[in-house]
Amino acid sequence: MSVDEIEPDDDLGRVPVTVVDVHLDPPGVADGGLVLLQERAPPNRYLRIIVGRYEAVAIARAFHGAPQTRPTAWDLYLETLDLLLVRLVAVTITRVEERRHFFAELELDAPGPPGTPGGGRVRHHVDARPSDCLALAARREWVDVRVAREVLDAAGIEPGAGGPESRDETELN
């Protein structure tokens, strides 16, 4: 993607990011994984999110396009959304506490009740763990992954500032 194609922050201060890597059992993380997000536009800060091992494996498999032998809970959730004509639009990391406890939400586009203006569709925001949000987004290439600007300001790591994987943290999200 060229610099001209990078999406700006939206009006709500949500910054587009890309999942750049998933690490299983990184140093300093007990029985978990690390999902590394990077801001698409300068200053291209990184965000490290520590997740449980099961979630890290699910994200890594989807991120790398590895075949699944059986459907996961995230596959079931997405299949159910499809059957209900609900579309996963975006996942957003919404806030952070202590630079390591992250919170997130799913943005869903669903059929509205009869008489709903705007084509009969409504948007819903559902609180969820960042690990679940990222596991779902990794299975749908078109889903936007975003981070609230204040989260990047509080927990983002500048490129070249000791590396995005250099801190020792054990909290799971």
Image (cartoon, grey):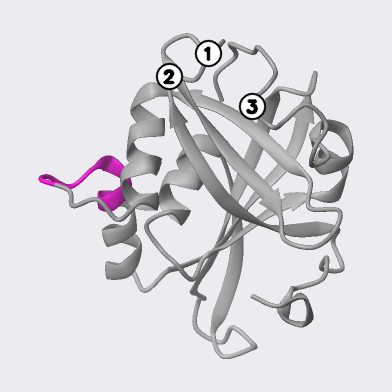
View extreme (bottom): residue: 119
Q: Which residue is mark 3?
A: 165
Q: Nearer the viewer, mark 3 or mark 1?
A: 3
Considering the numbered disc 3 on the image, is that residue within a helix, a strand or a loop? Answer: loop
Please, what secondary structure does the residue beneath circle 1 have? loop
Q: Is residue 11 visible?
A: yes
Q: Nearer the viewer, residue 80 or 60?
A: 60
Per the model, the C-alpha gap separating discs 2 and 1 is 6 Å
Q: Which residue is mark 1?
A: 29
The amino acid type found where label 1 is placed reads Val
Q: Quadrant of the N terminus?
A: bottom right
Q: For this view, does 9 lie left or right of residue 136?
A: right
> Most extreme residue toward the left, as rendered?
69
Q: Position of residue 2 (x, y in %)?
A: 70, 78
SS at mark 2 in the image: loop
Q: Residues within 10 Å of mark 3 (few under 14, many from 20)?
A: some
Q: Are marks 3 and 1 in contact (CB under 8 Å)?
A: no
* Nearest to N terminus: mark 3 or mark 1: 1
The structure residue drawn at horizontal position 81% and vertical position 39%, both measured from the top left corner, is: 151
Q: Amino acid at mark 2?
A: Asp
Regarding residue 129, the answer to whether it shows in the image is: no
Gap between marks 2 and 3, in whole Å? 12 Å
Quarter of the figure with residue 173: top right
Start-end of magenta stretch? 69-76
Give the side of residue 133 with respect to residue 138, left or right.
right
Image position, residue 48 (x, y; %): 65, 32
| Magenta region includes residue 70 | yes
State which quadrant residue 46 falls in: top right
Q: Are marks 2 and 1 in contact (CB under 8 Å)?
A: yes
Identified at 34% across, 33% down, the residue is 57
Residue occupied by mark 2:
25
Q: Tag 3: residue type?
A: Glu
